[in-house]
Image (cartoon, helix red, strand yellow):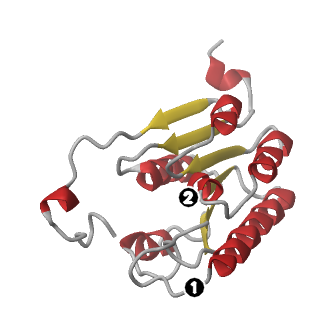
Amino acid sequence: MDKENDTNDGIVIVYTGNGKGKTTASLGVALRAIGHGLKVCMVQFIKGEWHYGELNSLKKLEPDLELIVAGKGFIGIIDDDHAFEEHVRAAETALDIVEQKISLDKYDVIILDEINYAVHLGLLQLGDVMRIIQNRPKRLSLILTGNHACEEIILLADLVTEMKEIKHPYKKGFKAKRGIDF
């Protein structure tokens, strides 16, 4: 008997590292899940105030995919005009939303986009994130994205992929490219 038919248990996936593609990898899983009739929710912990292409694309996947943009935007960059405490409140609200979505028992996959980075920046407590992972229903798969995944989260995960930057056009002075970077 193959393992696929052996269990209905979900898994915990972590996409981390300094290379591009962490959110994109999670969206690839979302597409695969939706193709099998599963329900997906994505909660974004950092992204929030810029318009980027996946917002348009993901709307086309409703109602099979629910996107919740909960962040206040990237912290400490040129146009960040929010106090650190506002970013903390937004991240805590996003975590509350994740807990609510889990309690609905409606989703098969929940993506916690940029949550690793939110923990690294001190917006969230590691213990709160670990509690969510440990207390999730067995059938639910969680995907945690973002640079700087904590070793404790990596140990709890079933699948961990590190995206490693080898070369990046920004280092040559290229600006972000529509459809590629946002």
Quadrant of the image containing the N terminus: top right
- The answer for how far apart the CA atoms under marks 2 and 1 are is 18 Å
Where residue 174 sits, quadrant-wise, is bottom left
Residue type at numbered disc 2:
Glu
Of callouts 2 and 1, which one flags the residue occurring earlier in the amino acid sequence? 1
Callout 2: SS: loop
Considering every residue shown, the one lying at the far left of the view is 172
Query: At which x and y percent is residue 10?
Result: 71, 37
Marks 2, 1: nearer the viewer? 1
Considering every residue shown, the one lying at the far top of the view is 1
The disc at residue 114 is 2
Name the foreground residue: 141 vs 123.
123
Residue at 64%, 19% in the rendered image: 3
Callout 1: SS: loop
Quadrant of the image containing the C terminus: bottom left
Q: How many marks?
A: 2
Residue 129 horizontal side relative to residue 28, left or right:
right
